[in-house]
Image (cartoon, grey):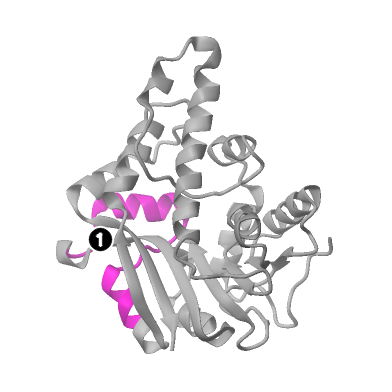
Amino acid sequence: MTVTSNASPVLSSLYQQSVADYWNTEENPVNLKLGEVDGLYHHHYGIGDVDWSVLDAPAESREERVVQELHRLESAQAHTLMAHLGPLRPEHRVLDAGSGRGGSSILANLRFGCQVDGVSISESQVAFANQQAKERGVDDRVRFHFRNMLDTGFETGAFQASWNNESTMYVELSLLFAEHARLLRRGGRYVCITGCYNDAYGLPSRAISQINAHYICDIHSRSTYFKELAANRLVPVSVVDLTPATIPYWELRARTHLATGIEEAFLEAYKGGSFQYLLIAADRV
């Protein structure tokens, strides 16, 4: 499938170029190995109760069982997001903003039968995701584009639902939510799952700064999400604190061969109260 972009430059700053460079070359096993389980490459974290018995499996099967369990947890996260998108039908069109290697987009098509457009500033991820859609035989309904989520070039009001799954920390929320509001038809649903720093804690903690440096991102405050949603006619209908549900995922990952070294920062931030993992669903009014 041809990788498409809109007429304006996709990368509008040196920072965006640095993020694109990172994801164009990223081949971390914690992303790739998990996706190989069922062909859904999610690139996000997990939620739910952990089957700790995987750590006690025989040496010859332990790594495989760990991979399967981590992938099960991240798939549970994706299904939780999908459950908040509202009643979608096959004739609806939905947008995956910051679509990565395409797992959430393909899952949405499998679940709802709808047409999905994914956008990413990583050309290698777009090509990978389009290949996955082709191999599944859904490339007529699921398409990935080399475009900027802040300026997609899609027509106004074209989408019934849209989402960001752990990608909002790479952009200014005022610009992002303005674009989502433009793209959604009235009554359409926007959902994001994101890590945000807790305003009640104060300024971002040291652990959050470590996470920012690791992923070349800028984690926003909880209050900024609600301020910018309201400013862009996106009215929250559901807010779910997923922090307790994601801690077991990080505790498991920290004890496996797939640990990357950032696990302790996440655990410190979550358990210390400076960081929260939220699902926010909002309607376009």
Q: Considering the image in quadrants, where does the C terminus appear?
A: bottom left
Q: Is residue 246 left or right of residue 10?
A: left
Residue 141 in which image quadrant: bottom right
At x 62%, y 46%, the residue is 40
Q: Main secondary structure of the magenta part?
A: helix
Indicate whether 4 appears above or below 107: below
Residue 228 in which image quadrant: bottom left
Q: Position of residue 2 (x, y in %)?
A: 84, 64
Check if residue 142 falls in the magenta segment: no
Q: Is residue 162 left or right of residue 166?
A: right
Q: Position of residue 97 (x, y in %)?
A: 57, 68
Indicate whether 263 appears above or below 14: above
At x 39%, y 56%, the residue is 212
Q: State whether residue 265 appears in this view.
A: yes
Q: Residue furthest right?
A: 1
Residue range of the region highlighted in magenta in the rendering: 202-228
Q: Position of residue 36 (x, y in %)?
A: 65, 36
Q: Amino acid at mark 1?
A: Pro
Residue bearing mark 1: 204
Nearest the eye: 273 or 165? 165
